[in-house]
Image: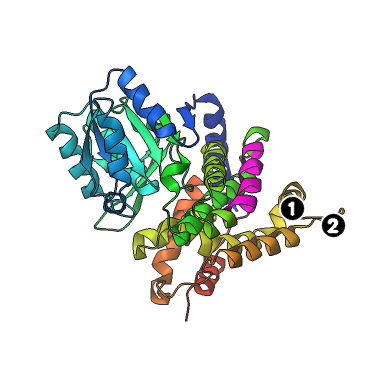
Amino acid sequence: MLKHRLYRTYTAGLKVAAHILPMPRPTLFSGPGSMNELLESMTELGFKRVLLVTDEGLVQVGIVDKVLEAAAQLDLQLDVFSQVKPDPTYDQVESGLEAYHRFHCEGILALGGGSAMDCAKVIAAKVTNKRPIKKLAGLLKVWRMPAPLFAIPTTAGTGSEVTIAAVVSDPSSHIKTPLMDPKLVPLMAALDANLMIGLPPKITADTGVDALTHAIEAYVSKNATQETMAYSVAAIKLIFKYLPRAVMQGDDVEARHKMAMASYYAGLAFTKASLGYVHAFAHTFGARYGIPHGMANGLALLPVLRFSLSEIEPQLRKLDELTAEGQLGNASAQHFLANLESLFSTIDIEQTSALIQREDADALVDLILKEAHWNYPVPKFMNREECTQLLLNISKV
């Protein structure tokens, strides 16, 4: 179809851009205690007052206090903005921007999962770009360098510490607004497993599936390269091995660290190779129903892979070989999918949701197809009927 050729031409252009544009990476501190190295480096760079963007949950469990105490020992003033909610909205960004100016901050430290990271990125962009968020949305719309940004992820899922993207929602329309610009990559990041120890099993599982989805969608993407495929494979192997341990034994520091690295690798992969239909479904579910992003990915991953199987069978067979699941030359795409389903069962990933309303199907399909076709180099195109059927299969009657 003509429109499919148009989509392919556009996403091929994105592939070229991903190789031409400089893709910065943060200075990375990794391992237990690396938070302190990051904070010390911030003071060495001359920062004295920084806005800490986080959520109330991390305040209540004491993680914010740990960071504040470590910063105080270095004479680094952190002013806390903890109003971030799941799937942050424009108004949260504006509140954070007001706090940044009220406290006369010199930079921003994001502490938390993907929501805190996304909110912090957009606040940083708004400090120097005096335009509405809608004007910053899309590719390369952040014209001025954002305020200095640092990141400490407390979940192993989004990979936001290394990606060029940030997603916030319009609170009126519930439509997610993606900003994509290399300027949004933090200057420095710390992957500190000690800060992930208290993460509940459910959140550990859902965020781990988010990282897994990044890696798999990047691997089967039409824009995948040898470099991105290597990062995807590294992430997938680590997740299959360590995610069940991190879920079952939350104080397993090694598993937490390996999952943090897996999330980082997956972020490197999809920053260049992009994503696919799973994320279009997940973003739509999150914006419309408030379903957490990792959980939403878990709902859509297996159905989308099965739909795309005719186009991605060789890639999934190769993943089965590389993850050592296919034994004695018997690797297959179906075997990989079966093991993925087994992993989901082990860590209690939901496959259907009663939150998704069947009467919303037409509106949801519009949003899913628009996002996917104009942003993602999907391996196989989905029409309205196919998308609707997949959506209805995910919704719980």
Residue 378 seen by the camera: no
User: Is residue 242 on the magenta stretch?
Assistant: yes
Residue to which mark 2 is pinned: 330
Locate residue 262, reporting x and y percent: 56, 43
Residue 126 vs residue 152, the one in the foreground: 152
Residue 360 vertical placement versus 220 (above, below): below
The kind of residue tagged 2 is Asn
Residue 316 in the magenta stretch? The answer is: no
In the rendered image, the vertical position of residue 344 relative to residue 261, given as above or below: below
Q: Position of residue 123 (x, y in %)?
A: 26, 37
Q: Is residue 56 visible?
A: yes
Q: CA distance from mark 1 to mark 2?
A: 9 Å
Which SS does the magenta portion mostly show? helix
Query: Which amino acid type is marked by label 1?
Result: Asp
- Tell me if residue 285 comes above or below residue 192 in the rendering: below
- For the residue pair 287 and 83, the one nearer the viewer reads as 83
| Numbered disc 1: secondary structure | helix
Residue under the point 33% across and 38% down: 110
Label 1 with label 2: CB-CB less than 8 Å: no
Left or right side of 65 for 281: right
Residue annotated with mark 1: 320
* Residue drawn at x 48%, y 45% as measured from the top left: 375
Q: Earlier in the sequence, mark 1 or mark 2?
A: 1
Q: Position of residue 5 (x, y in %)?
A: 59, 46
* Element assignment for label 2: loop
Q: What's the mark number on residue 213?
A: none
The extreme bottom residue here reads 397
Taking 44 as reference, is 223 left or right? right
Look at the image and give the residue range highlighted in magenta: 229-243
How many numbered circles are shown? Answer: 2
Mark 1: few/some/many CA within 10 Å (<14, 14-19, 20+) = many
Q: How is the image coloured?
A: rainbow
